[in-house]
Image (cartoon, rainbow, N blue to C red):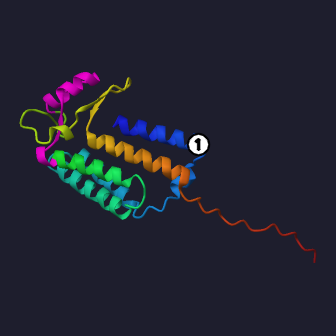
């Protein structure tokens, strides 16, 4: 998702220009970080295997990320990420795939051909039977290098990630420095 990548890049640059550091971000007291790596691995495996494993992998991956977010709910930014994931899970759960607005795709300058020919099992074209259509991919993003259509959940997710990075880099705990041993002058014997 281009939107999340741009939001993260802007947050990193803004935090760095205002005195933030990646060391502070890395020192955030996040619990159960392995859940995120596990979610990524499950989703990657499900994408490669495909078929009926794909939706199961998405559910397991979303559950792992949800667990991580619940364990870290006191960290600013995780609430928006959780709301975004919940909104996306709700619309996908009700429709079986993420509904995409043809009109929004046209405004973004992208095509829906891959959905029409069945090359994208994660998306479907929105129609009059779509439930909660407004939570689907309805927001055109006219990025010059890769236009896309995103959902309100994607916007919340990108905003939450940007908030987490920006605040974490600027106000996160200072990383612990390794204690240096004092230099000792050799004693002549």
- Report the residue that reaches farthest toward the left: 129
Residue under the point 33% across and 62% down: 70
Q: Is residue 32 left or right of residue 28?
A: left
Q: Quadrant of the N terminus?
A: top left
Whether residue 82 is in magenta: the answer is no
Examine the image and state in which quarter residue 156 appears: top left
Q: Which percent across, then down, holds residue 67?
A: 31, 62
Q: Which percent across, then down, holds residue 141?
A: 32, 29
Q: Is residue 34 left or right of residue 60?
A: right
Q: Nearer the viewer, residue 139 or 147?
A: 139
Q: Quadrant of the C terminus?
A: bottom right
Q: From which residue to which does the magenta span run?
A: 93-118
Residue 110, placed above or below residue 185 = above
- Report the residue that reaches farthest toward the right: 188
Residue under the point 23% across and 26% down: 105
Whether residue 95 is in magenta: the answer is yes
Q: Which percent across, then down, holds residue 98?
A: 18, 40
Residue 21, placed above or below residue 6 = below
Q: Nearer the viewer, residue 127 or 65?
A: 127
- List the residue tagged with mark 1: 18
Q: Nearer the viewer, residue 44 or 140?
A: 140
Judging from the image, what secondary structure is the residue with disc 1 in? Answer: loop
Residue under the point 16% across and 42% down: 97
């Amino acid at each position: 998702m281009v939107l999340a990548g741009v939001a993260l890049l802007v947050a990193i640059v803004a935090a760095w220009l205002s005195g933030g550091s990646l060391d502070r971000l890395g020192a955030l007291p996040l619990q159960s970080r392995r859940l995120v790596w596990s979610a990524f691995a499950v989703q990657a495996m499900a994408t490669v295997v495909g078929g009926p494993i794909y939706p199961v992998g998405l559910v397991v991956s979303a559950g792992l990320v949800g667990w991580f977010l619940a364990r870290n709910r006191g960290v600013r930014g995780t609430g928006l990420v959780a709301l975004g994931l919940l909104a996306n899970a709700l619309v996908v759960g009700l429709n079986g795939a993420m509904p995409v607005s043809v009109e929004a795709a046209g405004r973004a300058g992208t095509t829906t051909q891959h959905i029409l020919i069945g090359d994208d099992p994660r998306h479907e074209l929105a129609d009059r039977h779509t439930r909660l259509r407004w939570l689907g991919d309805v927001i055109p993003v006219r990025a010059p290098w890769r236009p896309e259509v995103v959902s309100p959940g994607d916007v919340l997710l990108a905003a939450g990630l940007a908030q987490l990075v920006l605040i974490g880099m600027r106000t996160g705990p200072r990383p612990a420095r390794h204690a240096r041993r004092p230099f000792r002058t050799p004693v002549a014997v």
